[in-house]
Every structure is written in structure tokens, then in C-alpha cells.
Image: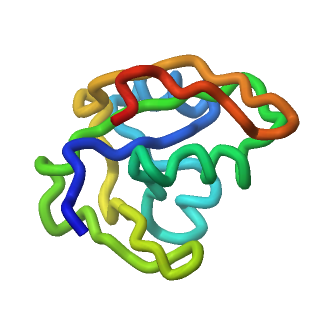
Amino acid sequence: MPVPDHVYKVASREIYEASQEEGTFVGQPIDLQDGYIHFSTAAQLGETIRLYFAGLKGQVLFAVPVAPFGAAMKWEASRGGELFPHLYAELPMSSVTRMADLDVPADGIVALPEWVK
């Protein structure tokens, strides 16, 4: 599997804004529980949003480049055996390249920004 340039994360606006103030993102509750920050590729993102964020308002979607994280970004089997990016480190907020507000309808189907590639 070719490694993409960017991976994507959905987080609550509250956690995202607190992370902006602190300078680092340590993750959502599920990330803290699992010991790494869950990300999705562009191809995986729609299904991730549908499964885990349906009906949630006040979310943000953000993009992070893969290359700067080296070995801390691991590709591990998850949903259906598909390889997902997991970051075993705190995320410096300065590495976020794009961000968009995200209110997810009950069916979980959203139009993704054009920069999700």
C-alpha cells in the first residue's frame, strides 16, 4: 500500500481548540484509551465518519502530513483487516495543514472538503 501524503482526524471542536491553546493534541477519549491517535486515509474517512461520528455536531476535520512522524506513525490492521494510520506520539498542532468544521447528520454521510485527497 502506498503511503499517502496526509492523514485525517475528526475531533470535537472543544478538544481541538484546547489543543490549539496547549500546542499539542493528545487525542480524543478513544485515542487516550487505546494509547495512540487514530487517523484515517482519504479513502477510509467517509466510513470512519459514518461509523463513529453520525449525528454529532461541533466536530472538526483536520489534515496532518505523514512524513514528519516517521516510525511514530504505524500502519496497523483494524476495520476488516484494512491498514489504518495510528500515531504513537503527541501531535504538535503546528503540523495541522487544513481544518474544517464538521456537523455530521444522523446518517453519517457528509460531503468532504476538496482538500481531502
Please state which of residues 85 and 35 is positioned toward the viewer in this rendering: 85
Residue visible at 84% across and 35% down in the picture: 55
The quadrant of the picture occupied by the N terminus is bottom left
Occupied quadrant, residue 109: top right
Residue 19 as seen in the image, left or right of residue 66: right
**Location of residue 3 with respect to 117 vertically, above or below:** below
In terms of depth relative to the viewer, which is nearer, 26 or 10?
Answer: 10
Residue 46 x/y as whole percent: 58, 44
User: Viewed as shown, does residue 8 lie left or right of 2?
Assistant: right
Q: How many marks?
A: 0
Residue 63 image offset from top left, x and y in percent: 36, 34
Quadrant location of residue 93? Answer: top left
Q: Quadrant of residue 57?
A: top right
Residue 96 location (% of width, % of height): 30, 30
Q: 50 and 39: which one is in front?
A: 50
- Placement of the C terminus among the 4 image quadrants: top left
Rendered residue at 32%/71% (across/down)? 75
Give coordinates of residue 15: x percent, y percent. 58, 33
Frontmost residue, 39 versus 114: 114
